[in-house]
Image: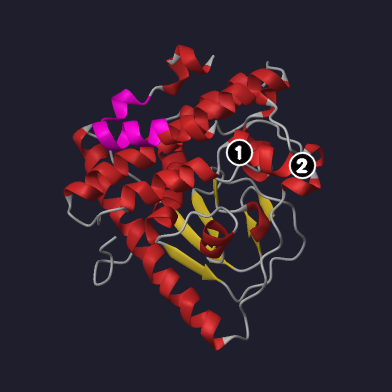
Amino acid sequence: MLWQGRRQSTNVEDRRGVSAGGLAAGGGIIGLIVVVLNLLLGGDASQIPPELLPGQQQSTQGSSTNDSADNLRAEFVKVVLAETEDVWTNIFRQKGEQYPEPTLVLFRDAVQSGCGAASAASGPFYCPGDHKLYIDLSFYEELQNRFHAPGDFAMAYVIAHEVGHHVQTLLGTSGKLARARQSMGQGESNKLSVKMELQADFLAGVWAHYANRAKILEPGDIEEALTAANAIGDDRLQKETQGRVVPDAFTHGTSAQRMYWFKKGFDTGDIAQGNTFSDPSLN
């Protein structure tokens, strides 16, 4: 991705030197739903097997080399956030609406959000309660080393996915989901969660569509995003961590589904094409 020298978003809170106190595992793009879905879907942290949690990220404080890499990644995610701001502001303007920009919170190891406390082990997440995205930048290494999804655009996809959740909140989708959840069992809730997450993947693809039009994508960028989407599908994660696949427990979608919806967003660039909730294949 051709990002260096481009505008960096100012909607960023840097809490990398701030202690967060007590921890609770958070839910983000990698499929560990606790913090966000506790708010939206009534998720239960006690039901997540310990083996599903990635290893705790080591603190990068006190290492000048790691701090330098961390700061470079901070510049990168600020540029990606700025690019999402430009795209979604324009899309909302075309609908005759304003786009309230989300805030990106950078942290190390642990953070306190409007959805509760979270650890870096949960991966990046979006909190609809405060309209903020949260990310420990060491997740870049997690993508590369644990999920075998290297490349800067893999990380850009992660950020764009969380911004997709912000768009869903602004459009009222998140609220409708929370209300529907109140009268559902766990199985039905999981299916709704899958549709929600796949739509966020689609919206990330829509952003990538316009980023490509702006000529900031490089050859191989979309492949990096698809590799990341493939790596964090529910079926693949379950197979790797539990040795078996339990479809009823899916919350984010299979690898194939995640790749399909991201690619559909990228190919069409049309948010009207991303109604995962009416797709019969997801029922």
Most prominent secondary structure in the magenta stretch? helix
Q: Which residue is mark 1?
A: 236
Q: Which mark is residue 159?
A: none
Calculate the distance from the C-alpha at mark 1 to the C-alpha at mark 2: 21 Å
Residue 189: image location, x then y, percent: 64, 23
| Amino acid beneath label 1 | Arg
**Which residue is at the front of the view, 99 or 228?**
228
Split into 4 quadrants, where in the image is the N terminus? bottom left
Q: Which residue is mark 2?
A: 45
What residue is rendered at 60% in x and 19% in y? 180
Q: Label 1: state its secondary structure.
A: helix
What residue is rendered at 37% in x and 66% in y? 76
Q: Is residue 57 above or below residue 241?
A: below
Split into 4 quadrants, where in the image is the C terminus? top right
| Amino acid beneath label 2 | Ala
* Span highlighted in magenta in the image: 260-274
Q: Is residue 88 above or below residue 149?
A: above
